[in-house]
Amino acid sequence: MLQALTQVLAAEPKIAYALLFGSRARGTEHADSDVDLAIGGRDLAFSLLELGGLIARLEEVAGVSVDLVLLDEAPPGLAFRIFQEGLVLFDRDHPAFVERKAKAMLEYYDWQPIEARLARAVLEAAQRGR
C-alpha cells in the first residue's frame, strides 16, 4: 500500500516531499486505522477540486480513509509531531524539506511554553470546579 500511495503523491509535480505519520508510521495501526499523510513543497497550492481528487485517488489505492495534511497549514504542534515521528515517503527537494522541518521545530519551541501554561491553567480551573 505504501508504494502505491507514494506513486500517487509523487505523480503530483507540486508535491516536493511526503511523509507518513500516525499509527501506521508507529506500527500501531489496527484494521480500521486511517492513513495519515503530510505533504509539502515550495508554494504548494491546490484548489479544493484538486485536493479532493488527490484524496480520492489516495483512498482508492489505500482502501481506507486518508487524512492529508498540508504542512504549511498545519498548527505548530502537529507539524512538529509529523517531522518527529513521520516516515519520509519521498523527498525531491531536500532543501525545502529541511527548511520546513526547521521552521516546524522553531515554531513549536516558540509556542510550546505558552501551550504548557494554557494547559496548566485549564487543568487548575477544572480542579477548582470551574
Image (cartoon, rainbow, N blue to C red):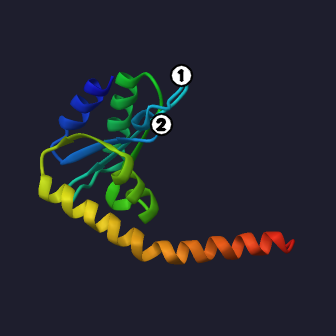
Earlier residue among tags 1 and 2: 2
- Residue lying at 44% horizontally and 31% vertically, measured from the top left: 27
The label shown at residue 23 is 2
Q: Is residue 40 above or below residue 23?
A: below
The answer for how far apart the CA atoms under marks 1 and 2 are is 11 Å
Label at residue 16: none
**Which of 70 and 122 lies nearest the eye of the viewer?**
122
Residue 31 bears which disc, if any?
1
Residue at disc 2, secondary structure = helix
- Amino acid type at circle 1 is Ala
Q: Out of 72 and 109, give the one closest to the viewer.
A: 109
**Residue 24 x, y percent position in the rendering:** 43, 33
Are the residues flagged by discs 1 and 2 in contact, CB closer than 8 Å?
no
Q: Is residue 113 visible?
A: yes
Q: Is residue 15 visible?
A: no
Image coords of residue 85 (percent x, y): 38, 47
Residue drawn where x is 50% and y is 30% of the image: 29
Q: Residue at x 48, y 72 (%)?
A: 112
Q: Name which residue lies at 33% across and 56% down.
A: 71
Q: Residues within 10 Å of mark 2 (few under 14, many from 20)?
A: some
Q: Secondary structure at mark 1?
A: loop
- Residue at the right extreme? 129
Give the side of residue 16 with respect to residue 27, left or right.
left
> Horizontal and vertical percent for residue 83?
33, 53
Left/right of residue 55 with respect to residue 118 in the rendered view:
left
Q: Position of residue 106 (x, y in %)?
A: 33, 71
Residue 55 quadrant: top left
Q: Is residue 5 above or below residue 72?
A: above
Question: Within the image, what quadrant is residue 127 found in?
Answer: bottom right
Q: What is the quadrant of the C terminus in the image?
A: bottom right
